[in-house]
């Protein structure tokens, strides 16, 4: 689906998002993430071995909420599914995200031997709050 302009604006901004994935039991697991978009595709970065990539490989359904850091009542609530998870370019991608969110050239929290992964999400449903 096509992302509404407000959703694109929030994703492009220096705004944190929360992603919920599903545990094997069906229970939700939520994490705060850095996020952006490429056209109508939602994109974020994580590391192998964490709960999120394991959950998303088993069940591609996700829920993402991104809110305006300056006005948290303005937000986009997105339900969608993971369409791709790739390693190629993931180290450069997390550096770009660190630049966006922290103003630094290199991701400062990289762990020895860590393998980064870029996650791409297609939205199925988008709700907006813009009071």
Image: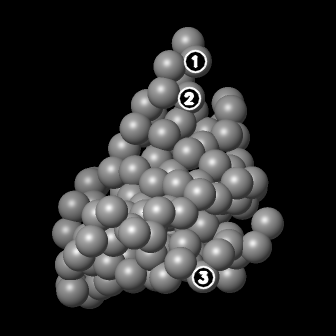
| Marks 3 & 1, CB-CB < 8 Å contact | no
Q: Secondary structure at mark 2?
A: strand
Q: Position of residue 93 (x, y in %)?
A: 47, 76
Identify the residue shown where x is 21% and y is 86%: 103
Does residue 78 lie above or below 35 as drawn? above
Identify the residue shown where x is 27% and y is 54%: 111
| Marks 2 & 1, CB-CB < 8 Å contact | yes
Mark 1: give few (<14), some (14-19) or many (20+) Cα within 10 Å.
few
- Can residue 1 be seen by looking at this rendering? yes
Mark 2: give few (<14), some (14-19) or many (20+) Cα within 10 Å.
many
Give the quarter of the image for residue 14: bottom left
**Label located before the other in sequence (3 or 1):** 3
Q: Which residue is mark 2?
A: 22
* Visual colour scheme: one colour
Residue farthest along the top direction in this orientation: 25
Numbered disc in front, either 3 or 2: 3
Q: CA distance from mark 2 to mark 1?
A: 5 Å
Q: Position of residue 130 (x, y in %)?
A: 44, 70
């Amino acid at each position: 689906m096509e992302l509404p302009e407000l959703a694109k604006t929030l994703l492009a901004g220096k705004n944190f998002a929360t992603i919920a994935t599903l545990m094997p039991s069906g229970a939700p697991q939520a994490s705060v993430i850095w996020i952006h978009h490429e056209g109508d595709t939602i994109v974020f970065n994580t590391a192998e071995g964490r709960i999120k990539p394991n959950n998303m490989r088993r069940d591609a359904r996700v829920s993402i909420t991104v809110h305006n850091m300056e006005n948290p009542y303005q937000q986009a609530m997105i339900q969608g599914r993971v369409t791709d998870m790739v390693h190629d370019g993931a180290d450069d991608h997390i550096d770009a995200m660190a630049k966006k969110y922290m103003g630094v050239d290199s991701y400062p929290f990289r762990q020895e031997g860590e393998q980064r992964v870029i996650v791409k999400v297609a939205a199925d449903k988008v709700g907006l709050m813009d009071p």
